[in-house]
Image (cartoon, helix red, strand yellow):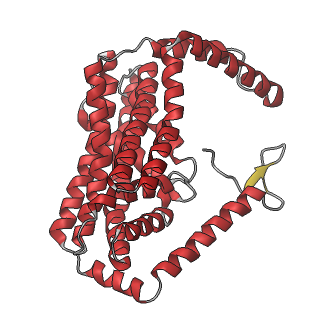
Amino acid sequence: MKRAESDQRDAHGSPRRSQGHRPWQVLLLLVVVVGGVALVATFAGSTLTDSMTTLAHLNWPWLLLALIAEAGSMAAFARTQRRLLRASGTKLDLGSVMAVTYAGNAISVSLPLAGSEMATAFSFRQFNRHGIDAAVAGWALAVSGIISSLAFAVVLAGGAFASGSATAALVGVSGAVISLLPAATVIAAVRYRSIRDALNRLLARLFGVSRRLVNRPGPDADSALERFLDRVARIRLPRLQYAEVFGLALWNWVADCLCLAAAIRATGAAVPWRGLFLAYTAGMTAASVGLTPGGVGIIEAALAAALVGAGLKAHHALAAVLAYRLVSFWLVMTVGWLVMLLVTRRGDERTPADRAA
C-alpha cells in the first residue's frame, strides 16, 4: 500500500497544496467518520463509564500474563526470521534479530499506509549491516511474510470452524484462501522457472512504461531483477526447518491472541473461547486497512464489536480491548522506539571506525 499524500510537487520540487479532494479520499474519510460514529453509538453513555471503571480495577496477575504472552509472540516472530536468515550459513545472534524485530515493528505501527514497507526496508538494511547477503535478506523477509500469512489463514480458518457457525466457517475459509493467493504466486514464481520468466517479461513491460513516463528505473533494472530472483531461487531450506518456521509463525499469532484472552480475564470476564479466535482475526483483518498508525481506532472498534458478538458484555469487551492494546501496541511500540535509538546510536559509534578501516 502506498502512502496517501495531501501535497503534490511542482516542476521545481516545491510542495503545493492539491486542489480539491480525490473521490477515494472522500470515501475513506466517510468510512472513518461512519466507523467513529458507530463506535461512539456502541459504547456511549453508561457502557463507556463502566469500561473505564473496569479498567481501573484490572486483575494485575492476568495483565502480567498478557505481557508474557505478547513477549512470546514477538520472540516467535524474531526466531522465524533468524531461522530463515541462517539459510546462507551466516550465524546471527537472537538478540540482534530481536532488536531489528522490535524496531521494525515500531516503524510499521507508527506510520499509516506505508508503515509495513518502511519497516521491511529498515529490516533489510539492518540485516545487510550484520553481514547477511542481500539476496538472503530479501528472501528471508519475503518468506517470513508469506509463512506468516499462511499461519494467519490457519488461525482464521480454525477460528471460523471453532465458532460453530457454518456461515462464519465459509467466510473464514474464503478469506483464508484469498489471503494466500499473493503468497502462492510468489512461491510459484520463485520455484518454477517458466513462471519466473513470465513474471520477468511482465515486469519488463511495466519498466518500459515507467521509463517512458518518468525515465525510471534505469536500463539495467530488468537484468538486475532477473539475477536477483535467480539467486533467491537457489536458496533452500530443509522441509523440517520450514515446518519449524511455520510452527513459530503460527505461535506468533496464537500467542498474540492469548494476550487478548488474558486481557479479557483481567477484566473479570470469562473468555469466549469458541468465538475468540474468529473475533481476533476480525480485528487483525480490520488492521490491514492501514488508514491510521497501528490501526488505532479501527482495531479497537472492530475487535470490541467482534467480542460483543462472541458473547462478552459491551463494557467488558471495550475494557479488554483497551488493556490488550496497551500491552500489544503501545508498550511494544515504545520498546521498539527505545531499541531504535540504541541501534542508531551504536551505528553512529561504529561509523568513525568503519571510515578509518
Quadrant location of the N terminus? Answer: top right
Q: Position of residue 235 (x, y in %)?
A: 40, 15
Q: State the residue at coordinates (27%, 58%).
A: 259
Please give left or right for residue 240 compared with residue 210 in the image.
left
Name, please, the residue furthest toward the front.
166
Q: State the residue at coordinates (56%, 73%).
A: 36
Quadrant location of the C terminus? Answer: top left
Residue 103 in view here: no
Please give left or right for residue 254 compared with residue 175 in the image.
left
Q: State the residue at coordinates (72%, 23%).
A: 207
Position above or below: 162 against 48: above
Q: State the residue at coordinates (35%, 72%).
A: 317
Position above or below: 284 against 234: below
Q: Position of residue 9 (x, y in %)?
A: 78, 48
Q: How many marks?
A: 0
Name, please, the residue furthest toward the bottom.
46
Name, please, the residue furthest toward the left.
61
Position above or below: 244 against 122: above
Residue 302 in view here: yes
Q: Position of residue 236 (x, y in %)?
A: 36, 15
Q: As rendered, which of 61 and 211 lies closer to the eye?
A: 61
Q: As rendered, which of 89 and 35 lies closer to the eye?
A: 35
Position above or below: 35 against 293: below
Q: Position of residue 119 (x, y in %)?
A: 47, 42
Q: As rendered, which of 172 and 101 lies closer to the eye?
A: 172
Q: In the picture, residue 203 is in which quadrant?
A: top right
